[in-house]
Image (tube, rainbow, N blue to C red):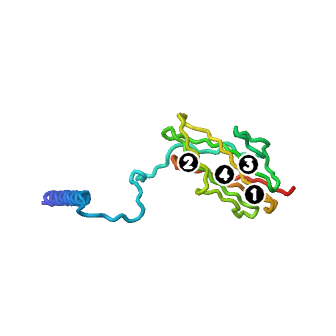
Amino acid sequence: MAAHKKASLGVEVLLMLILVVMISAVILFLIKSGMISVKASGSEEPILNTEFIPLEREGVLTLTSFSFCRYVDSNYRCLQPLERFPLGADVYFIFTVESSTENEKVILIENYKLKNPQGIVILDVDARNDFYVESTSEKKNEEITFKDYFITDLSLEEGVYTLELHLENPILAKNVKATKKVELFRK
């Protein structure tokens, strides 16, 4: 008797699953043929852009060097590395990033913030103004050198400023954050 009830329950569950699949197939057929219309709500994101099982991707993203310079030439050489700059000067900085490649591709995004001696952000180069690098490489790891600069204003106060550098590799889903101090003084 107990075996009969278990078999009966199994058959009922199987019949319900078959019924659900058949109803779904009919509904999808009616939608495809245009007999039923569907209104889209919310943002449409392609299903292939979704990570069903978010896994930590393997790879490396590291900052291997970071310097302030009086000037960085077109060959990415730091001319006269400095830690102190007069107000009104252009402050150049150069840094090298080592990143793993994924499918022979490297994508890096650079953003930074400059904070005054009180810790208040006075310059924010964020996602809207980022520096973006996309390249291909057959190597396992690729080293990419960035150069950038900011202009100091004579109206700024003297003191030690902090540059917060944010680097991202969206392919690897990895981020690196580094801070470096620079002193600004009056001539």
Q: In front here: 8 or 62? A: 62
Sequence order check: which comes first, mark 2 or mark 3?
A: 3
Which residue was labeled with disc 4?
178
Residue at point 78%, 46% (across, down): 70
User: CA–CA distance between discs 2 and 3?
Assistant: 23 Å
Left/right of residue 143 with respect to residue 162 in the rendered view: left
**Is 66 drawn above or below residue 19 in the view shown?**
above
Secondary structure type for disc 1: strand
User: How would you rate the neighbour count of disc 3 (Cα within 10 Å): few for under 14, some for 14-19, many for 20 or more?
Assistant: many
Q: Position of residue 28 (x, y in %)?
A: 25, 58
User: CA–CA distance between discs 4 and 3?
Assistant: 16 Å
What numbered label is drawn on residue 169? 2
Residue at point 36%, 64% (across, down): 40
Q: Position of residue 173 (x, y in %)?
A: 52, 50
Residue 13 shows up from this direction: no
What numbered label is drawn on residue 92? 3
